[in-house]
Image (tube, rainbow, N blue to C red):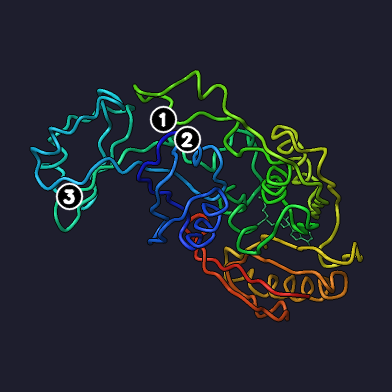
Amino acid sequence: MSAPQRLFAGCTPGLEEALAEELGALGYSGEVVGGGCEFQGDLQHVNLWSRVASRVLLRVAEVTTVEQLRALDLSPYGARFEVDAFGVDAGRWGAALPSTAGALKLVLRGTKRGCQVSLDTSGELLHFRGYRQEVGRAPLRETLAAGLLRLAQWQPGEPLWDVMCGSGTVLIEAAERAAGLAPGRNRSFAFEQFASHDAAAWAARPRAEGAVKTELVGSDLNAGALGTARRNAKRAGVLEALTLERLDATKLQRRGERGLVIANLPYGKRVGDRDELAQLYRALGRSLTAACSGWAFALLLQEGAEHLGLRVEERHRVSNGGLDCEVVLGQL
Ligand SMILES: C[S@@+](CC[C@H](N)C(=O)[O-])C[C@H]1O[C@@H](n2cnc3c(N)ncnc32)[C@H](O)[C@@H]1O
């Protein structure tokens, strides 16, 4: 690991606490702020190992004048930057540095005293793990799936059953965690383009740590979705760890004494879908109560949690692809 740097890890709104908890498990203590966490850490390590962060910014400097901005020594990173300016006079501050499309991204953000200068170290957003080439009809970002598992306090070793697994995002995230695989092991990052990047040391990075044997089951009514889940899991290298079955979540049979039953429920896009969804949620609630008593549940949905008829102990608001959603947690 290199010397700690001032970093900001961004995440989906609503996952800030889950991200702080994950950073804690990675050995960092962060300050939760809107949209992420500020902390001191190793940017390579966080990019490679965070499952919840959507990107990692390096806090380069805070300047109060355009001259200071122009005088910053950015040579350890590169010679050309694509400049994104928020809350600053783009003409004044942005013009201090010429912007080159496609170069390393420099983010200028207005502050009370001037301008905060940050460098994007991730490149493509971190939910792109490199395995998912196919998605189902309503796919979940990998970072939100990982956050959902954190909010539910799931730990490798605890049986997990996704009863509406779709293309398998939650299961694959859980399987990678249980196998101790770094989520970013199959992708590249913007920091690899930094002038000061030590490519030899990076090439020798560990990409996995200890595995914990875990029962991971996914079921869905849609055979096509299960095929997609199978192929995504194969590309991620975790297919062997999963049991995938075609089952109706409203007619589940008992399977084990304890564990976490999870699902990203279908949402209604049109008003006419509402009654149908309420009916599905009621049937799902009854099925879970009958088949999974003794299990914990974690359900991600947009609205209509009351139709489940389950005793919800915790709720967390999260944004899912721009939609206001919630995660409901409890015990069956
Ligand atoms: C929002 S999607 C889940 C997406 C999934 N998280 C992913 O990453 O692809 C909802 C899933 O519920 C499934 N589903 C709907 N009704 C079901 C039922 N009665 N039993 C099992 N699965 C059902 C759909 O086939 C769909 O795959």
Return the disc, 3 or 1, that comes first in the chain's sequence. Answer: 3
| Image point (86%, 50%), residue name | 245
Check residue 88 in the rendering and tell me which mark sits there, or answer none.
3
Give the residue type at disc 3.
Val
- Residue 201 percent across, percent down from the top left: 50, 22
Q: Given the image, on which type of amino acid does mark 2 rest?
A: Gln
Whether label 2 touches label 1, CB < 8 Å: yes
Evaluate if marks 3 and 1 touch, with contact meaning CB atoms under 8 Å apart. Answer: no
Q: Residue at x 56, y 41 (%)?
A: 49
Q: Earlier in the sequence, mark 2 or mark 1?
A: 2
Disc 3 crowd, CA 10 A, few/some/many (<14, 14-19, 20+):
some
Tell me the tag on residue 44: 2
Please report the residue visible at 9 percent of the width from the left and 41 percent of the height from the top: 66
Q: Residues within 10 Å of mark 2 (few under 14, many from 20)?
A: some
237 and 227: which is toward the camera: 237
**Secondary structure under badge 1?**
helix
Label 3 CB less than 8 angstroms from ligand 1: no
Give the residue at mark 1. Answer: 191
